[in-house]
Image (cartoon, rainbow, N blue to C red):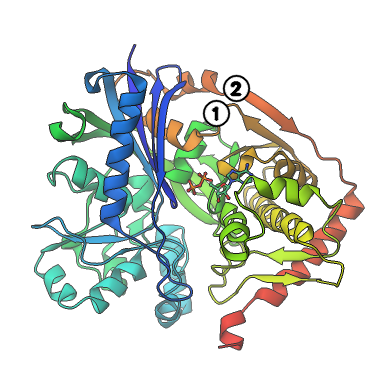
Amino acid sequence: MPYLMSLDEGTTSCRTIIFDENGKSVATAQHEFQQHFPVPGWVEHDANEIRDTQFRTMREALKLSGLDAADISSIGITNQRETVVVWDRSTGKPIHHAIVWQDRRTADAISKYDSPENQQLVSQATGLRLDPYFSATKIGWILDNVDGARAAADAGRLAFGTIDSWLLWNLTGGSVHATDISNACRTLLVNLKTGDWDDDLLALFDIPKSMLPDIRPCSCNFGQTEPEILGTSVPIGGMIGDQQSALFGQACIETGMAKTTYGTGCFLLMNTGNDIVRSEHGLLSTVAWQTEGQPPVYALEGSIFMGGAAIQWLRDGLGIIDTAPDVNSLASSVPDNGGVILVPAFAGFGAPVWDPYARATIQGLTRGSTAGHIARATLEGIAFQVVDLLRAMEQDSAVKLSEVRVDGGAAASDLLMQIQADLLNRTVRRPCVLETTALGAAFMAGLSAGVYTDQQDLTRYWKLDREFEPTLSEQDREQQVKQWHKAVNRSKNWTEETP
Ligand code: ADP
């Protein structure tokens, strides 16, 4: 039987999952890596640590599976998107820590570009918006703040990549510098229509073309691994950004199908087919995926920066739970939020509000408020953000979703999923395999290796675990959403007003 190895490089951990051809996981290895917060609002990773951790999980998963590297037909890579690594082409060494997608250090740089003409240029060309979330200003920051970096880049000595490119470069022993279109289109430097680097945007953000990787479809021949990594060389046949990979892994292959992933952040994506749907309500247009020889499939996307990470903050920042799953019993210790609202704008607001200067707030505290209320308000804060995304998406697409498929670590929480169904007033459907991000990349690798003949093949592997039906009355729901929006308004512009 052919096996596929999926490298799922997330924001907080590296995971390798080996799937059989039926999409069944046969072995998983996972390790967290360190988060660096050198200054409030900054988030960095050590790219070497990511590489080493990822390679370690590859070897461990292979060992656990009892397979030989020669049994792996192909490797697929999926990854945290937008995160920037700049490295020296001759030494292969990063010249700075990776700047992570959540990092807000370039908020001021972005405001310098912020004119109606630039907004128009960026949104028309990229489907995105001027925001520090995307890669362009993070690359600029490294070039302007690391000694000699700009001169080295101009001389062609530096390479830029998102984490997919960084891993590919290292897997192939520095012989392939490439990315895929689903990752490339998140840099703010790619034209959605041409699928290529855009000269006007490169000029606007002052990024030398010599640094950039080749852009390829998500499913194609990306190269071979160096033999010493797994014992024998294995082809790399898939590469796709994590959110698009989850959409693919959830088998949302028809136009109008949507999924929400509850990982570090939360991401709602809807397949819009071969059409680029432009958002009027603060969402992004993005490439969902492209298989070799086919036109790209596009998606509308709503991105929230703090989803499950808000639960991690309860654990690491506030210390009111020991593990993330403990949030569920703590939140269940109270019948409702007791009037407490937590707005999780810890890294500013993403879609649809887009405010890098916003900060998280806890509102409505009384003497009777408990840790239970804060835990419940945290779950609700995650779910309310998704409500705003879904409403924006339905307006933009003119599609009323009958169901939303869910995945990601925090989708394991039955309580969060029930709160979500109640606040969305939509059926929430959770599949048996929550690792759909890893599965999507494995599918991509399987397509290029000929394990699957076409995308339709993939739909038979989607199996329902549990469905959550809405139970809240419309009046209660709208009342709560109104309160939420009042609370959101109070979190806006926080650091500008309170330096
Ligand atoms: P990523 O891929 O972004 O690193 P994951 O999909 O692995 O993230 O999800 C991790 C998140 O899920 C963590 O932020 C954690 O708080 C949350 N999480 C994991 N298990 C549970 C659970 N049982 N209940 C609620 N949240 C959970």
Q: Tell me where residue 137 appears, x and y as whole percent.
A: 35, 70
The residue identified by callout 1 is 433
Figure quadrant of residue 245: top left
> Where is 48 relative to 252, above or below?
below
The answer to whether 43 appears left or right of 212 in the picture is: right
- Give the residue drawn at x 61%, y 80%: 493
In x, y percent, where is residue 356? 53, 73
User: Does the rendering let one see residue 179?
Assistant: no
Residue annotated with mark 2: 463
Residue found at x 45% / y 31%: 439
Q: Along the line of sight, which residue is nearer the eye, 148 or 214?
A: 148
Is 89 situated left or right of 329 in this image?
Answer: left
**Quadrant of the image for the C terminus?**
bottom right
Few, some or many C-alpha atoms within 10 Å of disc 2 (few <14, some 14-19, many ≥20)?
A: few
Q: Is residue 237 above or below residue 471?
A: above
* Residue 255: quadrant of the picture: top right
Q: Quadrant of the N terminus?
A: top left
